[in-house]
Each structure stands twice: as structure tokens, then as C-alpha cells.
Image: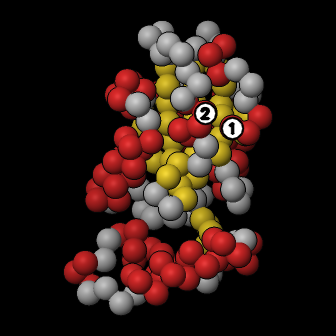
Amino acid sequence: MSSIIIYGSHYGTTKQYAEELSRRTNIEAISFENVKEINDYDKIIYLGGLYAGGVLGMAKTLKKLNNITNKTIILATVGLADPTDEVNKNNIRNNIKRQLNKEIFEKAKIFHLRGGIDYTKLNLAHKTMMKLLYNTVKNLPEEKKTAEDKAMIDTYNKKVNFTDFSNLDRIINEI
């Protein structure tokens, strides 16, 4: 069975997870931007960074699949907010559901990993977006703030890293 790890990473945390997963499983890891033919693989493991509710490169990559009948699809998101929070997890799943066709979404095993952020490395567009988002959520009443909102407020303009490679064990067990 041929396998591949594909990742979508803008600032590097997702790439770190993909490379570590590759090291532990001996499965090649490649950026979604460099994937030529996804249909050649029986097992597709996609790791994608969460940006503005979307999973970087996931929809573009997985829409290339022709027939998923005999394929194993594993998806892992990497984001700033705590993925053990049920509300956050449901929001992520709903965003994934909107990005994928129903057949792929229902077949996929989905995992969530926690990443990090370094505001000094953000490009101008992302810095501007984060500032606008921060200004919006910091003024929300406390009872209306989600776990994701609180994480963003707590980490705004800082460098934080919640990367924990031990969380790859669940994905490795699935592989």
C-alpha cells in the first residue's frame, strides 16, 4: 500500500509536525504545492494549518481525488486554539465539512494538533487580519468568547509554541 504525507504550512509548525510524522513512519512528506498525482496513493495523510477557518491547501489537494473507495484518508489540523475544547473542535470540523465533498469528509479520520504563532514572522496581510480579529474579540462579553477567541487574546503579539509531537501517536496508531 503506497502512502504519502501531504502538508499545508504557511509559517512552519505544520511542516514540523509533517516532518516528524514522516521520520516516525518512513512515509514521504511533501508540501501540497508540490503534489503531482494524489490518485497514485492508497493512504493519504493530510496535515494542514488553520487559517481564517480554512485548512491550508486541503480542499485544493483533495478535490484531485477521483475515486476514494479503496483509499484511507487521514486529516490533521494544526491551529493555535486548544483542540481538546469541544466547541473549538466542532467549529474546526464544520469548517472542514464545508471545504470537502461529503464522501471525503465522511471517510476521513480527523485529528487536531496544537501549533503556535510568532507575530514577528507574520506577513502584513496576516498581521492586519489578526489585529482586526483581536480588536473585535477583545471587546466581546466574556460569556460570548469562545476558547479560540480567548487563546487569540492571550497570545496576541507574542511568540507561543504549543507543538507536542507526542500527539502524533494517535495518528501513527491510525496509520
Q: Is residue 165 above or below residue 143?
A: above
Q: Which residue does the image show at 61% across and 9% down from the upper left? A: 1
Residue 142: percent from the left, percent from the top?
27, 85
Residue 61 numbered tag = 2
Closer-to-camera residue (19/91):
91
Marks 2 and 1 sit apart, C-alpha to C-alpha, by 6 Å
Q: Is residue 78 above or below residue 5?
A: below
Q: Quadrant of residue 146?
A: bottom left
Q: Quadrant of residue 159?
A: bottom right
Q: In the rendered structure, which amino acid carries the disc numbered 2?
A: Thr
What is the secondary structure assignment of the residue under circle 1?
Answer: helix
The answer to whether residue 24 of the structure is visible from this angle is: no
Q: How many numbered badges does the structure rendering display?
A: 2
Q: Is residue 18 above or below residue 158?
A: above
Residue 29: percent from the left, percent from the top?
72, 33
Q: Which residue does the image show at 39% across and 49% down from the upper left? A: 95
Residue at label 1?
32
